[in-house]
Structures are given as C-alpha cells and as structure tokens.
C-alpha cells in the first residue's frame, strides 16, 4: 500500500506493562515521538535534560518504535507571536530500534 506524503499515522504511547495511554499522530514515527517528548518534564537546558524511554506502537500494526526522548525549556525567539510565552519547551528524540509484538 503506497502512502501519500500527507497521510497521518497514529501511534499509541505505551507505558510500563504495555498499557497504551495516549495517541500521537504524524507522518513518521519520529514526528509522533517528538510530540510525546514535548510532554516530558522539561529541564532548564538540553544538557541537563533526562533521557526517557518512549515506546510508540503504530496503530493497526504490531510494530513498536522505541525512542529515547528529552525535553528542555529555552527562551522564545525574538520574533515570536504575541500568544507565545516567553519560555518554550523544546524536545529531541533518538531512535533506539523497533520491536515486533506477538499480540496487540
């Protein structure tokens, strides 16, 4: 099945024990992982941020994408819109691998 570049895919955030608590959408697993990472408790800088495991199961499949994610706060850009706060949360992720589940 070919996907167009605008197709969103849904990824369920897996907690310890396999419980799925949230769903993030994105064209790629990394895009969804970045959204999940921005919900982590932000550190004062990227260097001080704790690395946290993030597991996302692609809905409709048995594939679990495993990332390490971290978040930090930094000043908003000078040209920020009026509604944006003075400090914003940034995030990054690093892919650790893919796991295939026996059952969903």
Image (cartoon, rainbow, N blue to C red):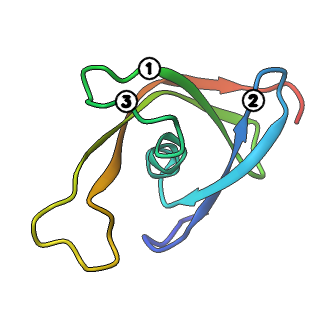
Mark 3 or mark 1, whichever is nearer to me: 3
Q: Residues within 10 Å of mark 3 (few under 14, many from 20)?
A: some
Q: How far is the residue under mark 2 from the one under mark 3?
A: 21 Å
Query: Which residue is more in the foreground, 84 or 67?
Result: 84
SS at badge 1: loop
10 left or right, relative to 94? right
> In x, y percent, where is residue 77?
15, 61
Q: Quadrant of residue 103?
A: top right
User: Going 77% across and 21% down the picture, which residue do you hit?
Assistant: 16
The mark nearer the N terminus, 3 or 1, is 3
> In x, y percent, where is residue 82?
27, 80
Q: How far is the residue under mark 2 from the one under mark 1?
A: 15 Å
61 left or right, relative to 90? right
SS at badge 2: loop
Q: Name the residue carrying label 1.
A: 51
Q: Mark on residue 6?
A: none
Mark 2 or mark 3, whichever is nearer to me: 3
The mark nearer the N terminus, 2 or 3, is 2
SS at badge 3: loop
The mark nearer the N terminus, 2 or 1, is 2
Vertical arrangement, residue 32 with respect to residue 17, above or below: below
Q: Residues within 10 Å of mark 1 (few under 14, many from 20)?
A: some
Q: Name the residue carrying label 2.
A: 15
Label pair 3/1, CB-CB below 8 angstroms:
no
User: Going 30% across and 31% down the picture, which residue do you hit?
Assistant: 44
Q: Work out which quarter of the rendered image holds the C terminus and state it.
A: top right
Q: Name the residue carrying label 3.
A: 43
Vertical arrangement, residue 80 with respect to residue 19, above or below: below
> In x, y percent, where is residue 78?
10, 66
Residue at the limit of the structure toward the bottom, as seen here: 82
> In x, y percent, where is residue 80?
19, 71
Query: Which residue is more in the foreground, 34 or 1?
Result: 34
């Amino acid at each position: 099945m070919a996907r167009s570049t605008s197709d969103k895919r849904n990824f369920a955030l897996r907690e310890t024990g396999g419980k799925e608590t949230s769903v993030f959408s994105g064209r790629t697993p990394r895009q969804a992982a970045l959204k999940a990472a921005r919900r982590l408790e932000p550190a004062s800088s990227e260097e001080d941020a704790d690395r946290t495991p993030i597991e996302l199961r692609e809905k409709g499949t048995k594939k679990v994408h495993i990332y390490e994610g971290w978040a930090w706060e930094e000043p908003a850009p000078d040209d920020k819109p009026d509604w944006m706060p003075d400090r914003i949360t940034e995030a990054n992720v690093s892919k650790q691998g893919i796991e295939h589940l026996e059952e969903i």
